[in-house]
Image (tube, rainbow, N blue to C red):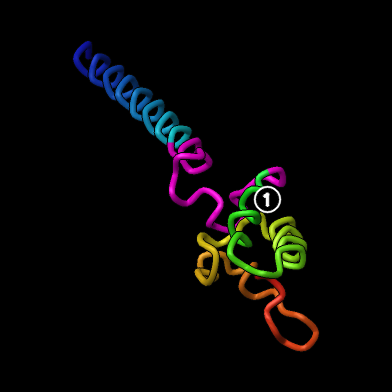
Amino acid sequence: MATKLIFIFYLIFAATILAQKQASSAKVAASQMHSRGNFQYGYSEGSLRPQDCAPRCSNRCSKTSFKKPCMFFCQKCCAKCLCVPPGTYGNKQLCPCYNNWKTQRGGPKCP
């Protein structure tokens, strides 16, 4: 009887340790997902904070000759989607909301 009791205690102890490890690894994964060093930060939908839109859009619009309209629409799109595709052109598939927002005429709204 004592061995069964020790075995049950051991199982409960092991299950508790395993649950704690899983919880801590989930917290680490969530914090890494939103860290600035992560490649996906800002490039996946909803991963930016509103205050991060201006620098991202500044980089996105850096090579255009129409800076004011580019910055206006980029910041508008970023505020809605909370993401800006990497680079100065293209890569919109990484941010579906940014890519799929269209004008009334059916053209792309976001630069």
Looking at the image, residue 89 lies above or below residue 87? below
Residue lying at 22% horizontally and 11% vertically, measured from the top left: 2
Q: Nearer the viewer, residue 82 or 4?
A: 82
Residue 96 lies in what quarter of the image?
Answer: bottom right
Pick the quarter of the image with the N terminus.
top left
Q: Residue 76 placed where, x, y %?
A: 76, 61
- Residue furthest top in the image: 2
From which residue to which does the magenta span run? 29-51
Horizontal side, residue 34 vs residue 54: left or right: left
Label 1: state its secondary structure. helix
Q: Residue 65 placed where, x, y %?
A: 66, 69
Amino acid type, callout 1: Cys
Horizontal side, residue 108 vs residue 42: left or right: right
Pick the quarter of the image with the C terminus.
bottom right
- Residue furthest left in the image: 3
Specify whether residue 94 is painted magenta: no
Horizontal side, residue 4 vs residue 33: left or right: left
Q: Residue 45 placed where, x, y %?
A: 59, 58
Residue lying at 71% horizontally and 47% vertically, measured from the top left: 50
Dominant secondary structure (helix, strand or loop) of the stretch shown in magenta? loop
Label 1 crowd bin: few (<14), some (14–19), many (20+), radius 10 Å: many
Residue designated by label 1: 53
Specify whether residue 42 is painted magenta: yes
Q: Nearer the viewer, residue 87 or 83?
A: 87
Looking at the image, residue 33 lies above or below residue 101? above
Q: Nearer the viewer, residue 7 or 75?
A: 75
- Residue furthest right in the image: 104
- Count every numbered label the image shows and give the total: 1
Q: Residue 71 placed where, x, y %?
A: 72, 60
Residue lying at 23% horizontally and 20% vertically, measured from the top left: 7
- Residue furthest bottom in the image: 105
